[in-house]
Amino acid sequence: MYAWPRVIHRVVISGIQAATHRPVSIEAVEVNPFTGRLTVRGLRLFEPDGTALFTDFERLDAAVRPLALLLGHVSFREIVLQGSTVRVVRFADRFNFSDLVSTSSSKPGQPPDVTVDRLVITRGTVTLEDRALAEPRTWTSEQIEIEGRNLSTRRTDGVAMASSVTAGAPMSLEMRHLRLYPIHLEAVVKTTGFDLSLARVYAPSDAAVSIERGTADTTLQVVLDARVARPPRPRARCAISRW
């Protein structure tokens, strides 16, 4: 009985390493199979060569419905993720997570049904190192807060709200009528005070318009449905607020 936590700890690490082919470390894992409670603390997932960190988090708490698993339904009452960081690197021909995407997409068949009654992500940070540029740049999205409800492959009434500060500009995301698979959502993305001079980094050298400075408030409306061959085009509004 005393060896149970150590066994779970080794099983979780082995499972993640087998699924990602990447080194991983975890401070602690706690599992209660009777209540369906799971707690993971201090997870760190590295790049394949183990020299740099890809993602980590301080704590993950989840409450799963054990009986639903017997019916092939991965159903969570709640998932709470705290203090997560993700380091994304863009190279000329790939991203540093391309191997993870190719591994998951190579598995045939439809994924199992998944339901999350409540999802909370707090104190998140994502960095993007763009090494495909002539002069590499690093962008940061911090203070990421996400809360979602009724996220499922079985229903289309999921909702999610998110906020962050990206490159110094506050951003918000609101999603309605969300289904996890096949993906369906209606979303509104808003940014406030986005620095337009950053667009020069990605503008072609022979562009007809060159923006030297200024900020903009933007609103982007998106409708996405994987079951529709030609979904409606996204609608966008942009207001330049200061030069």
Image: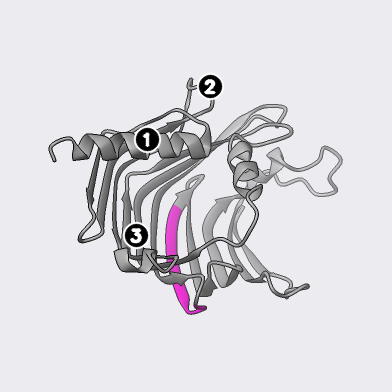
Q: CA distance from mark 3 to mark 1?
A: 23 Å
Q: Tell whether position 35 is magenta.
A: no
Which residue is nearer to you in this view: 208 or 219?
219
Dot label at residue 13: 1
Residue wearing tag 2: 49
Under mark 3, the amino acid is Val
Under mark 1, the amino acid is Ile
In the rendered image, is residue 151 in sight?
Answer: yes
Count residues near mark 1 (Cα–Cα under 10 Å), then give few for <14, some for 14-19, many for 20+: some
172 to 136, vertically: above or below: below
Q: Which residues are magenta?
A: 155-164
Q: Are marks 3 and 1 in contact (CB under 8 Å)?
A: no
What residue sits 63% from the left and 50% below the top?
107
Q: Earlier in the sequence, mark 2 or mark 1?
A: 1
16 to 171, vertically: above or below: above
Total residue callouts: 3
Instruction: For mark 2, give the secondary structure.
Output: loop
* 37 on left or right of 2: right
Q: Position of residue 126 (x, y in %)?
A: 47, 43
